[in-house]
Image (spheres, rainbow, N blue to C red):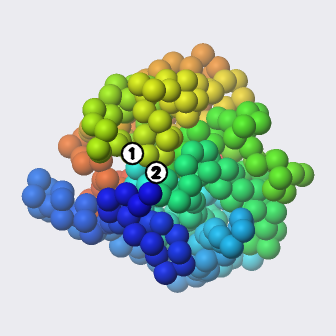
Amino acid sequence: MILPQTYISGDGIPRDSSYTVFGYYKKELAKFPFIKIAESENCSTLFKKYDYIYYTEGSRNLRLDLFYPDSKAGKPYPVIILLHGGGWKSGDKSFLHPLAERIACEGFLCAAVEYRLSPEAKYPAAVLDIKRAVKWLKLKAEEFRADSSDVILLGCSSGGHLAALCGVTEKIPFFNPVDFLPGISGRINLVIDIDGILDFTDPAESGKDTSDLYHSAGKLWLGESFKDNKKLWMEASPLTYISENSPSFLFINSSIDRFHAGRDSAVQLLRKYRIEYEIHTIPDTPHTFWLFEPWFTQTTDIIIDFLRKRIR
C-alpha cells in the first residue's frame, strides 16, 4: 500500500518525501529566525567518493558515501558511520554530508550510509542493512587506510536510535546478518546518539497511535502499534540490550524532552556496567538542531572533542 507522502522513485523504490533539510529549515525559522542551513567547510585534502554499493539484495543496491583526508602518514583512521534521521521512513544519506565532511577533516574516515526505510522494508531491515555496512567497511578498511578495529556509529533522531540498537546487539542473533561476510565481526566501539530515543515503550513514542487513519512513525516501521504488540516495541528498544558488552556512548540532545526517551535509564545501566558515556544537552534547540547553524558547529565541536580525548 502506498501511504500519504510516499511516491515511487525512478528506480522503482517507494520513498517518503516528508523529511527534507529545507522543509525543517522553513518550519523552524519562525521560532529561530537566526538559523542557517549548515554547510561543510572542506579541508583541501579531503577525498569524497559517492555511491559505493555495499550490499545488493535482488535488484536493490544499497550505497554509501565516503569522506576521508588525503594522508599517507600516521595511523589508520577510525571509521565513523553516519545514519540520517527521518522517523525510519524518510530522509537521505546526503543530509549528513556536512557533518561527515567536517569530521573527516579531523582525521577520520566517515561513511554516510543509505538504509532501507519503512515504505520499502519494515523492521528489522534497516538494522541488518547498517550491520552489513559495518562489515563491508571493515572488509575495505585497508583500501581506505582505515582502522577496522575502531568503528563508531553516529546517528541523528531515528538514525540515533538505530545507531544505539546496532551498537548494543552484537551478540543477538536476530539482529545480525549471518549470511553476509560471516568471518567479519560487527562489533561497534562507540555510539554517538544525537537526539535518538532508546526506549520505544516510553509514552512519548508508544502513546502516539491514537488514530487508525494516521499511524505513528513507529507503527509504520514496526508494522504494529504498541497496544497490539508491546513485546515488539520492547524488542526494538536499545534499552533492552544494554549489558557489560555494550560500547561507549556519547549523547547529544536537543532541549525537547521526548527525544530523550530512555536515555536516563540507559545511563543507569551504563554506570552499572562501568561503560564510558557523556551527555551534552544543548539548550533552547529544536529537534533537528544538528542541521543548522549555530548548533551545527557546536555539535561537531562536541563530537570531535570527545573523539580526540578517546584516541589519545
The 10 Å Cα crowd at callout 1, few under 14, some 14 to 19, many 20 or more, is: some
Q: Amino acid at mark 1?
A: Ala
Above-or-below relation of 266 to 28: above
Residue 217 got which mark?
1
Q: Position of residue 300 (x, y in %)?
A: 43, 57
Residue 141 got which mark?
none
- Quadrant the N terminus occupies: bottom left
Which sits in the foreground, 229 or 84? 229
Q: Amino acid at mark 2?
A: Trp
Identify the residue at horizontal 69%, vertical 59% (top origin).
133
Q: Position of residue 265 (x, y in %)?
A: 47, 21
The residue that mark 2 highlights is: 88
Which sits in the foreground, 2 or 262? 2
Classify residue 166 as left or right of residue 28.
right
Classify residue 121 as left or right of residue 98.
right
- Closer to the N terminus: mark 2 or mark 1? 2
Q: Position of residue 294 (x, y in %)?
A: 26, 59
The 10 Å Cα crowd at callout 2, few under 14, some 14 to 19, many 20 or more, is: many
Residue at far bottom of view: 44
Asked if residue 191 shows in the view, the reply is no
